[in-house]
């Protein structure tokens, strides 16, 4: 049985580990945090494509069962708004819920699968050869832990030890200092989420749905270090500077300050070690892409590891970098651009920004591109010359005559082959379903098209061997 060590039990590592366990692989999860210690609540927005990722795992309902807020319009600059309500998905909104809740849902899934997280365990050394990876860690009480696995996935955040141990650089640098966060109650809350920017700074406020609101603020006049003391009054002052009011914020349940870097590793894979989430890329919080990008990294990587374990073409795993590195680079570019526009300093730049943004977003074509990008629904991966144009694109959910949905068939890391007769030998990992246009379509477990072609037995068997592994004997 193929074994994998997942280092880091944040959202990215938890999703990856759960996927691998569901696929029948042997999974060990290491996390340096003590049991019960939250990963804080920095991330708070789950975009539409990530909601689809949860739906493909049967977890969207659990995420939605928690008190949360569906934000179907995202305020931009000036009076401009991005309308998400028309997105082509069952989840046309940003779900405002804490990272803590996302982790809770993923941890409960992992426990249901019988996988325990080894807390208080920090990686100290790593060595790999052609057959596997040897990993050394300091366990609870300081005892030495030695493990070996076929692969190691580094999901251990911006300060990734795994990344350092394989010698990967993390080029880039700081973009914004002194970003302030808090979850607070409001005496006089606004009617809806609000974002305001001016030459002094910016602030964003949105409800969790449980009586608390997340406030994110940046003030040009308050650029303290991450570890500098932070009082609620400082955040309230930044809010008043942006909104003209602090909405009577009080009773903070969480408060923090951090800085934002823009960094990305040049390679997401070094031999049998792979990186995902903040270990591979980090960027500004503008646009709320961080946790979402990491979760989608995990969704892309997990099925690849499972397929290669079953005998798929090794290139299936090699293409993880080819898929996800450009996505990470695009997020760095777009979030960085938005952050620089938001922090414009001169009165003229601010006035031009606030006047031009509504005019640009008045274009239906521009709005569609922007909403598809920020939601993640527009992500498409590369294809080889001669392949069908659908290859690499997101395949929307659909309902079949028996009442089931495509996304339900992708659960437990299964592929779906639409428009072709069942082929013996792959029933344990492929669902054979009706098609629509006379062509066969193989859908990957992450909901993207892997292959499309005429429904001929030889072509289909070749595609199944390449993407899904060897047939069962």
Image: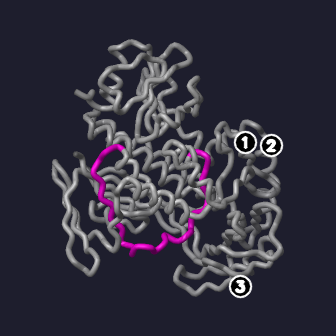
- Mark carried by residue 367: 1
Percent of width and height locating residue 448: 49, 35
- Mark carried by residue 233: 3
Region of the chain picked out in magenta, as a range: 23-49
Prevalent SS, magenta region: loop
Above-or-below relation of 167 to 374:
below
Percent of width and height locating residue 108: 46, 59
- Among the two numbered marks 2 and 3 on one chain, the one whose residue lies closer to the N terminus: 3
Percent of width and height locating residue 402: 56, 25
Q: CA distance from mark 2 to mark 1?
A: 7 Å
Label 2–label 3 contact, CB within 8 A: no
Label 2–label 1 contact, CB within 8 A: yes
Q: Which residue is mark 2?
A: 362
Percent of width and height locating residue 37: 46, 74
Q: Does residue 163 show up?
A: no
> 11 left or right of 91?
left
């Amino acid at each position: 049985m193929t074994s994998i060590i997942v280092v880091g039990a944040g959202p990215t590592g938890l999703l990856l580990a759960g996927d691998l366990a569901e696929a029948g692989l042997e999974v060990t999860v290491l996390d340096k945090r003590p049991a019960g210690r939250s990963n804080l609540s920095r991330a708070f927005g789950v975009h539409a494509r990530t909601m689809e990722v949860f739906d493909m795992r049967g977890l969207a309902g659990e995420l939605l069962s928690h008190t949360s807020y569906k934000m179907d319009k995202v305020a931009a600059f000036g009076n401009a708004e991005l309308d998400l309500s028309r997105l082509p998905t069952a989840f046309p909104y940003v779900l405002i819920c804490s990272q803590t809740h996302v982790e809770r849902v993923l941890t409960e899934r992992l426990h249901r699968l019988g996988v325990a997280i080894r807390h208080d365990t920090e990686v100290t050394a790593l060595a790999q050869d052609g057959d596997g990876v040897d990993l050394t860690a300091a366990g609870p009480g300081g005892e030495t832990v030695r493990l070996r696995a076929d692969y190691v996935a580094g999901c251990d955040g911006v300060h990734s030890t795994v990344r350092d141990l394989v010698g990967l650089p993390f080029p880039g640098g700081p973009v914004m200092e002194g970003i302030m966060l808090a979850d607070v109650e409001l005496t006089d809350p606004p009617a809806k989420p609000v974002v305001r920017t001016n030459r002094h700074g910016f602030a964003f406020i949105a409800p969790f749905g449980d009586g608390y609101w997340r406030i994110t603020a940046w003030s040009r006049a308050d650029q303290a270090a991450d570890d500098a003391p932070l009082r609620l009054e400082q955040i309230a002052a930044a809010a008043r500077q942006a909104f003209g009011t602090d909405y009577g914020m009080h009773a903070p349940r969480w408060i923090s300050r951090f800085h934002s870097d823009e960094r990305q590793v040049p390679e997401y894979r070094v031999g049998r070690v792979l990186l995902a989430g903040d270990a591979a890329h980090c960027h500004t919080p503008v646009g709320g892409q961080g946790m979402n990008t990491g979760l989608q990294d995990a969704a892309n990587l997990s099925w690849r590891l499972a397929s290669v374990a079953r005998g798929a073409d090794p290139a299936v795993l090699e293409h993880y970098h080819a898929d996800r590195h450009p996505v990470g680079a695009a997020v760095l570019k777009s979030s960085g651009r938005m952050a620089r526009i938001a922090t414009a300093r001169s009165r003229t730049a601010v006035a031009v920004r606030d006047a031009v943004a509504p005019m640009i977003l008045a274009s239906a074509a521009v709005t569609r591109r922007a909403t598809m990008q920020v939601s993640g629904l527009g992500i498409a991966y590369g294809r080889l010359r001669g392949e069908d144009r659908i290859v690499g694109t997101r395949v929307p959910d659909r309902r079949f005559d028996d009442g089931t949905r495509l996304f339900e068939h992708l659960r437990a890391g299964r592929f779906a082959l639409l428009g072709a007769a069942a082929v013996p030998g792959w029933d344990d990992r492929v669902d054979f379903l009706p098609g629509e246009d006379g062509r066969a379509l193989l859908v990957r477990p992450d909901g993207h098209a892997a292959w499309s072609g005429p429904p001929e037995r030889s072509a289909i068997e070749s595609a199944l061997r390449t993407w899904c592994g060897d047939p069962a004997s």
